[in-house]
Amino acid sequence: MTAAGGFNYWMSHSERYFRTDFTTTAEDRARLVRNPDSCLGCLQGYPAPLALNGHSTSTVELDAVSESHVSGSDSSLTSMTTASSHVSVDGLGFSGEQLCMDPYNYISSLPGKGTVAKLADTLQTWFKVPAGSTEIIKTCSTILFHSSLMLDDIQDDSSKRRGMPAAHVMYGVGQTVNCVSYTGAKAFFLCEELKNANACRKALYDELDNLFSGQALELHWKFHKTCPSMNDYIIMIDNKTAGFFRLVLRMMAAEASVSMSLEKKNTLLHFITLLGRYYQIRDDYQNLVSDEYAAKKGFCDDLSEGKFSLILIHTLNNSPTADRIRGLMFGGDRAGMSQEIRSYILSEMEAAGSLEYTKRIITELYETLWRMLDELEATLGPNTLLRALVQFLKI
């Protein structure tokens, strides 16, 4: 109703639709649209349309609606004038915010590891951040993490997330993208509640820039079917995945009650970046070999998505059947890739030593993290929570 009224208002004043040969009188037209310098009126005998917040779009008092205009099925018009901040959808009441948040609430309800929020708790040991600020940082980073998952599933054309239908399958691509934008704005609003909002906002800007830059690389390789170098792949995950870990660290450091030298902060930043690198390579490896991952996302789901990983890059550079694998992965419809083809590619990865190579990289990264954690604890003090988190991620 509001859209139709606004559209007619625009047509009556736009040069594109402006006409002088109306058969109706100016008084007739004024009942629908008043002069531009006056407040908007309403159709004679009917209430003005309501905005989503429940307030009239007109600044004048609503005209009394006579019983002759409101009877039978038209009686719903009277209820609109007293509605709260809800819009009627199929007879049910939904607030605008609820509709915006539905995809997020769905994806966040699915069981996950909660690594980002756990990381904030582990850093609390060293930074002594006030409890209120810690909760805001955890909420902000978790919002962005879940939003990125929804966007990833759309961009990867993935139909499952954590063993359930992806958010865009449940709510549609448009509504899910709208939710990602809405929750992104929520994260920035949350920053304003922190003590050092400027520093936290700067961290948010920087790491979102890194995250989207990393995502752009991955999407570019996938769209152009171009295999990246190992170095380029590491740059991508250091930007994309490790960005979430660095965001938590930088915001916790900004809100810290305990000062820390720049050298110690840089060492911790390096450790957190390596943790994000380990997390992604571990995840890609588990996607291909873990029965638990297969149950949640499907057997070797990354292969059907055409996703480049450390394992695939090694295979394409070392397997004698690399051309055949490229053809199977990028020559046809990946969404229709059969389980037999995925099994074949996995067997070729194993034959090329790619799984063993990746497992060795994961082990070396884990040992490096454990050694760095020893060094950090020697200068910053014991951190049993962080040590438990790293051990939890061990394969």
Image (cartoon, helix red, strand yellow):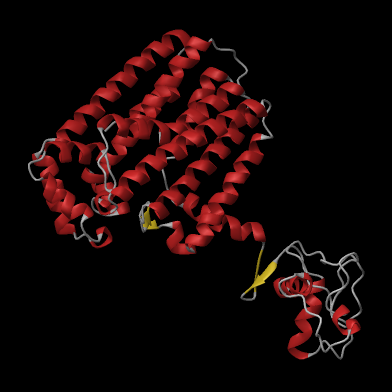
Q: Which residue lies furthest to the front in this view?
A: 20
Residue under the point 12% across and 50% down: 324
Question: Where residue 98 sits in the image (x, y, percent)?
Answer: 62, 58
Residue under the point 66% across and 25% down: 196
Question: Where residue 121 sits in the image (x, y, percent)?
Answer: 51, 29
Residue under the point 59% across and 57% down: 100
Q: In which quarter of the image is residue 226?
A: top left
In front of the other: 177 or 161: 177
Would you place residue 51 above or below residue 125 in this image? below
**Count of marks placed on residues:** 0
Would you place residue 332 above or below residue 3 in this image? above
In the drawing, does residue 334 fall left or right of residue 242? left
Q: In which quarter of the image is residue 280?
A: top left
Q: State which quarter of the image contains the C terminus.
A: top left
Question: Where residue 35 sits in the image (x, y, percent)?
Answer: 88, 70
Would you place residue 130 above or below residue 212 in this image? above
Would you place residue 183 above or below residue 130 in this image? below
Residue under the point 21% across and 41% down: 312
User: In this orientation, does residue 125 appear?
Assistant: yes
Question: Where residue 334 sits in the image (x, y, percent)?
Answer: 25, 58
Q: In which quarter of the image is residue 198?
A: top right
Q: State which quarter of the image contains the N terminus.
A: bottom right
